[in-house]
Every structure is written in structure tokens, then in C-alpha cells.
């Protein structure tokens, strides 16, 4: 696949000058296959959306909105001037013809995300063709197309080069996640929406929302309305309508929201509203395993979740559980003895009972890897084990026939500022997993933006561009991935500058995470 | 002025509960005078804009757009639900009645920015009243009103409390600036627009655009089209249409754009396109004082500027000029001798000639303080001296009858990360200036965001909230300013959280500039 630069023999010299400034094929993440020529065409003033041959009617406007964002995006950084009369009609792209096979626009895990994007060598009028099984594949195609559009400083129009081209694309993994944490710091809706926007640019497709934790409980739970008494402050809260807004905003961009309640540890804030959820006022976590009310509350939360969080999975946490309060609190200790359970058996009891509640609400479950490490054979077969502690866990999980999401903290934790984008890029989820049946059980991976030191002021630059480096690992066919990250530095730098041009505060590539630029210079070299 | 909390005797208990969560009077910057009660009203579903009694017709839609932004802003962070039928009509605010005296909506230095904002104790239907001399005063009133609107988690509506109230407000200084530097790093249009948005929130009113410098020349100059060959890269450039877009975007928010070319130093990048502007290829700055072409280019630039940058002032720089190249380059040295000028006389000659060119294009001039320090008595009386080196300069400048802008680097340089918001807040432009006639010559102050270590990834959190601390110093009457910054910490923290809620990445108050939050916790306490 070579990037060729040549210009059509335009009679107008100033068009040829425009050609000299074109970029290489700077797509991120790299598609499955690309073939292209070197013509340049220009988006016409009324570049439009057409559905000729499509089954999809776009009743909900998902595609129309995606197309409007495409136009906004390619015109955001420069004022285009479409009044030129110098153009031969034949160098203008009249629009985008989208052909979608499926009527269905329900977004769910495993939805077909493939697409084919092409512009023919000839035609009059000239159209871009985008074919996809689903509207969500088409949205990915729009993102790819947006990266092929460049403002041309000579014509003052938006140009598309490397024509004719055909791009055929489909993701390697179905689950390509990013975790945000609104418990250590509240994140406002506009901030979360900015994260979702940039996820769409990078073709990530799951926002794992670690909503609550020990420090705060910002979400409204209608069934147990005192839970959000555990918020940091009255205004640092989300109503269920806010949560629904986030889910819908994400869905319309092809992104599912995975909601998490992390039990039985990481739940101290629950007791602010309902102190009986604590073993005692002096020993406040994990949640009181001996109290039926604990499981009633979990049931209430998941019942409320089901109305808003439509993803197939719910995340039940299960990590870092220090069970000592259970033994040292008299009434819990008594319960343990009555039920012939030691602390670790009670931990298992808790996790499995929570799993059953989730199953009863129609969810499949994601649990952090400690649950697997401690009692993997007892977990529901509908469990997806979320690796985080170390590498090599996915191998064990799929060896036991369970599904796995890879987030090993040494490479895919965004709060580890010393983990570079090269580390993110090179982290391979299928390391040492060779059987195709086992490979299929690794549904994907996720980068985690834990919020201890991240609020609205540093969220974006801590996430980007490192999350995008992982996004290519999760999207692009293995054989197209670089074996040496140096080979993609320029292309990733280009994507980071594109994020900046779109108003996303992605950080320089040189250095650790969230680093300020070292010296004056071009975005493309920093 | 005391903040009182009490609720109207609503018959509905859940309204009274809503009252319990109200905030204090967290306005930033603090208005000139505020008197208020403690009623709470709710914005109705179709809260509208009315012009009853206004002379202003809003033909250009400035007010209408400002009102739309008000509604977008107050609803950005939560999904409001206006379907409640529980409300007595009398607790609903039906809209905002704006009364503007002046037909004229031309924005210029010294435009009347005052406004009066009030809600009466009674009335049916209930309206907010906003009175102003100009639409730009009215825009400030809308910003103030937006800070009085809060999402109420009980009713799920937007509430306004402390009713009845009357706010009378006018700025202390006419010039309240923020410098951005697009020469050390390119900043995309969306990023610059985000800065302008937050300037409007803080009532800053001049964007000082340090466009070009030694490192790069990103702006198109139609008269000398090779100048932007000095850009970092082909795509890191602004067309004149882009510049016009920035100017218009700012103007419609009541913000003037002060364009700068910094001559004769800080101009190395000019020679990339026109090498004859350098003394020689080996000695590239300052601009060649001996070359008539140098002044032709300056004339061409300012001629092009005049079509886009409509502010009364242009900034001609003049700082940090190392003139040694002039002596060491043969042809320049020869010219110096022929004209009987030493290096420093030639520096004066250059600056004054550039001033005359600016005057010929109808601009008044801003120059950095070195010009005043070296030959203050020779400067055009239309000069505004821009202090930056140290304190005490303003005093000397106004003593000589010239106008001054205060930006002393020890307190108002945002790139000095160790300068805290408290330093920014306490920096008084009128220090040691006691005569009213001299005080009037200090037209205001400016905080400077030099771009050596600031690109799209860290621009916002380096500027905010420290620039807002200075904004209150520049807006609020001296007698209303806190003498101890501790007294405004909570109110500024509230404003920084408001910025986060509106998608602006303002940094925590605790610690130096651009610091990450130290630990989990509420935005209001960090």
C-alpha cells in the first residue's frame, strides 16, 4: 500500500499548486484495506446526503445527524469559500450516497460495524459511496471519510485526494472500551460528551461508566433516592434523565454505555444515605453481606439501570475487596458463623448473588478479575472477566471458557502517566492465545481513565492521544498493525492534531501522558 | 450586602426541600451593586426574549444569539423537565425583557458596558428586566443572569433565587485583556473560540492576538502572500477569512480583537518567505531597518489588517530587540553610518516609522514598554504603552501623559505557572497612581498566555481560572474587591466549577497554574 502523490493535469495552475500541499494517507485507526489513486476532487457547496439503493430509512435521524457532524467537522477549523466559479463541474463531489442493508438501528454488542467507502475514477456527477450493513458501520465510514477531507488553502475549499479509492473496513474486536470515573471527581455532561465525540473519532465503541465508588455516589437511583446523598455536593449529581441523555448521545454515535456498580468493595458512599449498608459506622466497607437490604438495594439499582442502560452488559465490579470488617463487626460475624462462611466464601456468596440479580434483570455480567482469580469456576457462564491486574490473565480466562476484556494496568491504565502511547499501542490482547475458539472469547479491550487526579481540567489531555493508540490495536487487523510504533508516530501525531483542530485537548506524543509541549513547534512534530 | 436564604411559603413541601439546596450569591466577577431578597422562581418552558420599551432592533441578531447561548448554557449540564403541572403560574418566570437605549451596535473601545438586571417582588406574568445603554452591556447582563440560574434537582427545572433583586453594574476599566500566542504553537479556530467563550463568561473584553513571532507566521497576508510560508506547516495557517471569523465571533460576544505584529524583533519568521527582510541569512533578526521593503511589508500588513481587525488599536510590539545584527551586517552597518544612527537610534527610528504607518491606516498604537523606556517622549501621543517587565511602569507612563495597559509579568503572565490565582487577583493596576486624571490613563490590564509550552492540549487549564481572578480586579469597583483573596476563594471555586460545567477545562484553585487535582473530592473544594 503506497501513498502516491500526483496531480491531475488541471489546466488551472493554481489547482496544481494546491496539490503540492496534500497530506499522506493519515487515517487513524488504519482500515482493513485501502487502495487509492491520486486525483483530487473538491466538496461542492451543497455537498449532500443521498440514500439511493438503501433499505435504511433513518427515521431516527442517526445518519442525518452524523452527516451534519461530518460537515461541521471538516469545516470547523477554516472558513471555506464555495463561491469559486473557476471550477469545472467535473472536479466537484456532489455528495455522499449511503447504502445501508439493515432497517434495524438498535445498537447492541456485536452489531455489524463494517463499511465500504469508495469514490470511482470517473462519473458525472461525482459521488462518494458508502455501503454498510448497519447505520453504525456507516457512521464509522463517515469518520473515515472526514479524515480524507482537508481544507485546501489555495482554493479555500475542502478537498478530497487519493481518488479513486476503495476502503474496506471492519473492526478486529467487538468491544473497544474507555473507562471514565465520575466517583473520584464529578464530570459534567458537556465534558462527558466531548469524550464520547473523540471516542467516535477513534472508533472506540464502549463507554464504561464507573459511576460510583467509595468517594461519591453522584447518580440518582429512583428506587433508593437517598443513595445520591453520597454525592460530593448537591450540584455534583446526575439525574436519571442526565444518564439517559448520555446513553442516547453515545448510542447515536455508535457507542454503548457500560454502567458499573462496584460491589461489595468500593461502595462506602452508599451508606451516606443508607447507613445500614455499612457493616457499622466505624467499619464502613465492604457492603454488609449479612443484610438482606443490601441485596434489595442492588436489585433496585439494577432495576432502575435496566430502564436507561440498554447495553447487554452491566459491570458489577468485585475488585479489591478487603473483607475484614465482616469479621470484626459483631452482627456480620454472627451471620458468617450461622451460615458457615469464612470471609472469602462470603465474598464469593456476595458476588454470585449480585450476578444472579443482574441476570434476573436480563443483563450479562462483567466482573473485575479478582472474582475469577478467587472462584472462577463458580461464576455465571454469562460472565465477562475484566482483566486489570496483570498480563496473562486473559489466557487463563479463555482457557476456562469464559469471555474476557483486557485492561492490564501496566499498559492500558491512562492514569499511569508514565505509560507512553507506544506502550498503549503495543499491548496485544491476544498474547499467548492461539486457538481461534479461545481468541474469540477475548471480546476486546479497554483503556481506563481512573479519576483520582482527573477532573474537568485534565480529562481530555490525559485520555488522548494514548487512548487512540489502543483504539488502533483494537480496531485494525493484526497484520496491518505496526510491529514498531515508530512507524505510526507521524500518523498518530496527525490524528492528535486533528483532535486539537476539532477542539479536543489531546496532548503531545513526545513524553509521558498529559505532558505540556516541550518547546515551540509544529503540532505534527510534538 | 448579605446573602439570605429563605423560602416562600409554598404549600407544596417538595418545593421547600428544593430551597434547602440553594447556593449563595456566587457571581463572578462581583457586580458594582447587588440588592436581593430570598424568593425562588422557576424558568418556564418557553422562557422568552422580549424587547418591550427597547430602541434597539437587534437586526444583526447579536442579542438573540446571546439569549440562545444563555438558554443553552443553563441547560447544558442537566436535562430539565418542564412538564410539571404542579406549579402555580405565579412561580414561573415567563421571560426576559431587554431594554436597550442605543440603536448602535458597533463595538469599539470605550463602548458603554453597563447594565441593570432586576426581577420585581411581584407581577403577573413575571419577567426579568435587563436595561442597558448598548447591546454589549446587555450581553454582560445575560452573563450575570446565567450565573443566577441553577438546575434544581427536586423540581428538575431551572430556578432563580434571591428574588427580588436589582443588580447595577459597570466595569472599572474599559480594557480587560487576555493575550493568546499563535506563533509558538498554532491554535485551532475551535480552541480560540472556546477561549473567547470563557472570556465572555468572565467579562473580559479584549482578545490580544499575538499572531506571529520568530517561530512562525501562520496568518495569510494577501499583500505579501509569501509571509505565511513562515508557518510551521501548510495546515497550521489562518486565512484572512479565518481571522475575520475570529473577529466576528469575538465581536458578537462584546470582545474586541487586538492584532499584533511584533517589530522589529520577534519577526524572524517573516524572512522565510521574504529573505531580504533579514539583515542576512546568517543574522536574521531584527528586521532589516535599512531596507525600504521592510516598511512596505509593514504597510501592506497593516493595510490588510484594517479590512479585518476593526479595533481602534493595533499592537506593534517593540520588545526585546537585540540590534547587534544591524551593526555586524555590512550593508545595514553602512546604512547606519550614512544616516548617522547608532543601533539604539535605529531602533527608535524603526518603531516610530512603524507607528506612523499604523497611524496612516487609522490605528492608534499599542507598544511594549521598552519603547517607552528607551524613547518615551518621542512616541506618538496616540500610543498606549503596554507594561510587562515590572511594576511601577504604569506610574511613569501616565506621569508622562500616555495611556497604559498593565501586564506586569511577575503577576499577570499565565505562562508563569508558579504565579497563583491569589497573585493574579491581588495585582492592582493603579498602585501608586493617585491623581484621577492619571488613573484614567490606565485604560486597563491584560493577562498574557505566552505559547512556548501551550498548545491545544493545555491552553484552557493554563488560562483558567487565573485569568478570571484578574478579570474581577479589572471589572469590579475597587471598593468591592477583597483585600484578602481568602474571602473570594469559595466564589472563584464556584466560577471554576461553572466553567467545567460549560465544558471549559479550568484547573483547580489549589496549587500553581494548570495543576491536576491532588486527590478525589468536590470541585468546589479543590
Image (cartoon, coloured by chain):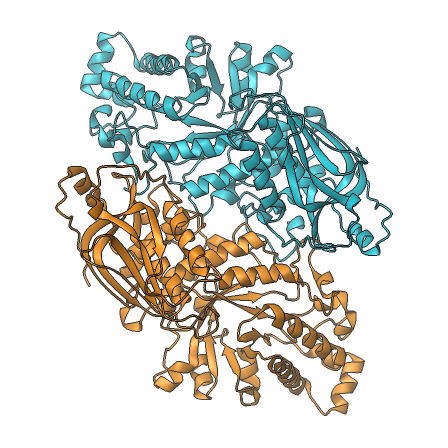
Chain colours: A cyan, B orange
Q: In this view, does B97 lie to the left or right of A204?
A: left
The image quadrant of residue B174 is: bottom left
Total count of labels: 0
The image quadrant of residue B172 is: bottom left
> Residue B132: horizontal and vertical position, in percent?
35, 68
Q: Is residue B367 left or right of residue B29?
A: right
Q: In this view, does A56 lie to the left or right of A415?
A: right
Going 65% across and 84% down the picture, which residue do you hit?
B353
Q: Depth check: give the residue in front, A304 or A219.
A: A304
Going 47% across and 53% down the picture, which residue do you hit?
B461
> Residue B512: horizontal and vertical position, in percent?
42, 56
Going 33% across and 54% down the picture, which residue do you hit?
B147
> Residue A455: horizontal and vertical position, in percent?
42, 44
Vertical order, B1 against A234 (above or below):
below
> Residue B278: horizontal and vertical position, in percent?
75, 73
Can residue B89 be seen? Answer: yes
The image quadrant of residue A160 is: top right
Amino acid at each position: 500500500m503506497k501513498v502516491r502523490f500526483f496531480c491531475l493535469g488541471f489546466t488551472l495552475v493554481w489547482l496544481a499548486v494546491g496539490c503540492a500541499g496534500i497530506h499522506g494517507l493519515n487515517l487513524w485507526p488504519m482500515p482493513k484495506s485501502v487502495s487509492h489513486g491520486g486525483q483530487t476532487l473538491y466538496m461542492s457547496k451543497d455537498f449532500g446526503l443521498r440514500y439511493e439503493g438503501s433499505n435504511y430509512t433513518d427515521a431516527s435521524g442517526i445518519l442525518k445527524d452524523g452527516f451534519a457532524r461530518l460537515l461541521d467537522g471538516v469545516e470547523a477549523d477554516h472558513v471555506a469559500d464555495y463561491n469559486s466559479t473557476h471550477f469545472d463541474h467535473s472536479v466537484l463531489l456532489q455528495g455522499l450516497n449511503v447504502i445501508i442493508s439493515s432497517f434495524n438501528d438498535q445498537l447492541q454488542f456485536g452489531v455489524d460495524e463494517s463499511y465500504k467507502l469508495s469514490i470511482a475514477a470517473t462519473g458525472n456527477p461525482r459521488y462518494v459511496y458508502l455501503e454498510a450493513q448497519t447505520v453504525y458501520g456507516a457512521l464509522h465510514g463517515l469518520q473515515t471519510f472526514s479524515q480524507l477531507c482537508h481544507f485546501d488553502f489555495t482554493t479555500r475549499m475542502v478537498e478530497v485526494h487519493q481518488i479513486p479509492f476503495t476502503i474496506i473496513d471492519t473492526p478486529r474486536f467487538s468491544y473497544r472500551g474507555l473507562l471514565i470515573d465520575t466517583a473520584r471527581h464529578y464530570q459534567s455532561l458537556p465534558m462527558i460528551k466531548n469524550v464520547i465525540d473523540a471516542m467516535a473519532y477513534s472508533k472506540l465503541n464502549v463507554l464504561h461508566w464507573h459511576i460510583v465508588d467509595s468517594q461519591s455516589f453522584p447518580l440518582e437511583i429512583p428506587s433508593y433516592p437517598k443513595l445520591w446523598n453520597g454525592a460530593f455536593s448537591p450540584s455534583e449529581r446526575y439525574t436519571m434523565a442526565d444518564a439517559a441523555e448520555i446513553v442516547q448521545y453515545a448510542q447515536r454515535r455508535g457507542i454503548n454505555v457500560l454502567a458499573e456498580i462496584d460491589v461489595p468493595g468500593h461502595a462506602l458512599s452508599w451508606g451516606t444515605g443508607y447507613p445500614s449498608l455499612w457493616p457499622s459506622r466505624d467499619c464502613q466497607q465492604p457492603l454488609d453481606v449479612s443484610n438482606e437490604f443490601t441485596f434489595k438495594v442492588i436489585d433496585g439499582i439494577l432495576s432502575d439501570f435496566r430502564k436507561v442502560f440498554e447495553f447487554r452488559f452491566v459491570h458489577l465490579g468485585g475488585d479489591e475487596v478487603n473483607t475484614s470488617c465482616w469479621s470484626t463487626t459483631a452482627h456480620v460475624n454472627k451471620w458468617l458463623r450461622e451460615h458457615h462462611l469464612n470471609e472469602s466464601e462470603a465474598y464469593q456468596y456476595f458476588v454470585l448473588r449480585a450476578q444472579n440479580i443482574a441476570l434476573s434483570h436480563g443483563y450479562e455480567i462483567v466482573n473485575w478479575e479478582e472474582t475469577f482469580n478467587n472462584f472462577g469456576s463458580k461464576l455465571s457462564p454469562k460472565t465477562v472477566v475484566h482483566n486489570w491486574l496483570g498480563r496473562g490473565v486473559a489466557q487463563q480466562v479463555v482457557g476456562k471458557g469464559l469471555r474476557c476484556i483486557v485492561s492490564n494496568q501496566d499498559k492500558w491504565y491512562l492514569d499511569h502517566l508514565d505509560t507512553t502511547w507506544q506502550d498503549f499501542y503495543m499491548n496485544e490482547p491476544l498474547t499467548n492465545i492461539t486457538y481461534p475458539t479461545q481468541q474469540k472469547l477475548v471480546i476486546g479491550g479497554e483503556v481506563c481513565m481512573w479519576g483520582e487526579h482527573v477532573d474537568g481540567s485534565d480529562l481530555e489531555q490525559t485520555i488522548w492521544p494514548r487512548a487512540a493508540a489502543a483504539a488502533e490495536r483494537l480496531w485494525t487487523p493484526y497484520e496491518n498493525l505496526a510491529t514498531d510504533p515508530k512507524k505510526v508516530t507521524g500518523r498518530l501525531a496527525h490524528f492528535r492534531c486533528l483532535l486539537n483542530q476539532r477542539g479536543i485537548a489531546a496532548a503531545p506524543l513526545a513524553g509521558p501522558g498529559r505532558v505540556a509541549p516541550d518547546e515551540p513547534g509544529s503540532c505534527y512534530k510534538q
